[in-house]
Structures are given as structure tokens and as C-alpha cells.
Image: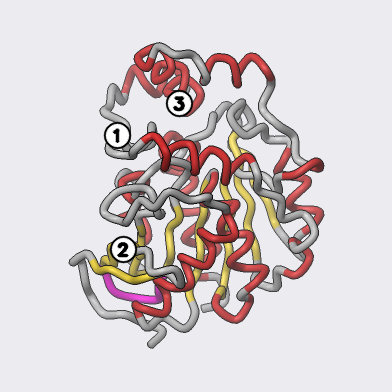
Amino acid sequence: MNHPGARSAAAVAHAQDGTALAYQPQGDGYPLLLLAGQANNHHWWDGVREDFHATHSTITLDHRGTGASDKPQGPYSTRQFAEDVIAVLDHAGIERADVYGTSMGGRIAQWVAARHPDRVRRLVLGCTSPGGPHAVERDATVRRSLAQTDPVAAREVLTDLMYTPAWRAAHPGPYATLGDPGMPPHARLGHLRASNGHDAWDVLPLITAPTLILHGDQDRLTPADNLPLLAARIPGARSHVFPGARHAYFEECRAEAGPLVAAFLTEGA
């Protein structure tokens, strides 16, 4: 089944190792799988999900370790998360889908598209990187700021990395992109190690789906210099940069990013 009907109830798939994976289909139309960032559940997409329902149904999921999914001890990896995605598509009866992954979700989407090219019609990668020695990593100042022991201060740092002060002043929150508060420490650490251990450089040329790569040019969490690296490795990839945007460009630049992605996904349809 390529076109799931109008649905909104949560469902549960099971990974190859038996881990229960909660996912949330909504809407009607060609399936669009939305993959959230590190240590976040499906609510990451709450602010923009409806932008795609004119043409697509959307499927979000809770990565293992988050939300209503199981939280096994691990270890976790982006390749494992990608196989979890395939388990969700199988359970939902979706043979082929468009895939939009941001941040760690973009890392996961790289593996999905490279290892399972028959399952991905079109691919969008946002605020992400190829990982490994070729990637441009965040600077030491950012790493130290995120690692501080005061959770309130660390959350403030993360919020500042996600959104510009002007946007925050107009949109005081709460924000759904700052991590799943219900994650146990072992799962949070597992997500961090999975994201840090990502390296899809060698398989990026295997991606056959038409690909759009997006980034905010003021992103310090995942530096924008990773965009041209991905674009050069993925055959025929196109890219777009949002001036002044930080990591959560998809929310802050929603008025531009939503239509841009929607137009790409429906191109030639």
C-alpha cells in the first residue's frame, strides 16, 4: 500500500530485535515520513507537520529510547535507527515514501535512502551532516556549553542554538525541539553516541532518490559547512540555505521552508 488513508491513531511496530516502535500516521495522500532529531520524540514536528497535509499523509515515529517506544539499554546507532524506520514502513504497509529528516533524523535518513533505495521516492535532509572524519563538527565552545551540569543553563544554551533571539521573542514557547523529558539517562546517552558515531560518507553516492538539502547559515549545532559536503556526495542533490537561521530553520523559516519542501516533494507529480 503506497497511499495510506486518513488516520491519526498511534500504532506500534516492532524492530528486528523486538523493540516496540510507536508511530503516528496522520492525513491522507502520498506518505511522507518525518524523522526527528537526537533525543527527541515525534513532537519535534508539531509546529510544521500540517504544512504537508495538502498533498501528503505524514508518519512520525518515536525513535527507540523516546516517547512511547521501548527504551532498551543499547548500544544505539543511526544505522539501527534506519532499520527501525524500515520496520515502521513495513508495519504500516508502505512500500515507498518520501522521507524528510532533520538533525539526527537527517543522519538516519541518509542510511534509509542509501541502504533501501527502493523505499524512498524523494529525500529531504535538513540541518544535518555526513558524520565521520569528513564532517565539520561544532566548535569546542558549543560542546562545553551543552555539557554543563546545570540543566536550566544547558537548556537555555540549546534553545539559543535552535532559534534566534528575535524569533524567540515573538514565539516564547514552549518548544518541542529541546529533547524528550521522559527519556531515561541511558537512552539519552545512547542517542548522543549514535549521533556522534554517525559516518555515512562512503554510502552517500549510493542514494538514488532526488534529494534536497537544507540548512540555516547561522547553525552552530550542526555547522552549515556540512551542506556542500552532502550536496557533493549525493548524486544530483540540490540545496538551499536560509540566511540568519539557526538549527531549527524548519520552524523559524516555516513560511519559506514549508512551501519549498512541499514543492520539491510534488515536483513532477
Instruction: Name the residue nearer the viewer: 90 or 52.
Output: 90
Q: Magenta region's main secondary structure?
A: loop
Residue ranking furthest to the left: 9
Q: Residue at x 44, y 13 (%)?
A: 149
Q: Which residue is mark 3?
A: 163
Q: Is residue 106 above or below residue 89?
A: above
Q: Secondary structure at mark 3?
A: loop
Q: Which residue is mark 1?
A: 181
Find the distance from the CA under tag 2 to the CA under tag 1.
Answer: 18 Å
Q: Earlier in the sequence, mark 2 or mark 1?
A: 2
Disc 2 vs disc 3: Cβ atoms closer than 8 Å? no
Q: Nearer the viewer, mark 3 or mark 1?
A: 1
Q: Amino acid at mark 1?
A: Pro
- Placement of 162 over or under 149, stated as above or below: below
Q: Nearer the viewer, mark 2 or mark 3?
A: 2
Quadrant in which residue 145 is drawn: top right
The single residue placed furthest to the front in the displayed view is 73
Q: Which residues are magenta?
A: 27-31
Q: Nearer the viewer, residue 181 or 209?
A: 181
Classify residue 217 by image quadrant. Answer: top right
Q: Residues within 10 Å of mark 3 (few under 14, many from 20)?
A: many
The structure residue drawn at horizontal position 21% and vertical position 72%, both measured from the top left corner, is 7
Disc 2 residue type (three-letter): Tyr
Quadrant of the image containing the N terminus: bottom left
Q: Position of residue 233 (x, y in %)?
A: 80, 57
Mark 1 element type: loop
Amino acid carrying label 3: it is Tyr
The disc, 3 or 1, on the residue closer to the chain's N-terminal end is 3
According to the picture, the residue beneath numbered tag 2 turns out to be: 23
* N-term mark: 2 or 3: 2
Between 69 and 165, the one nearer to me in the picture: 69
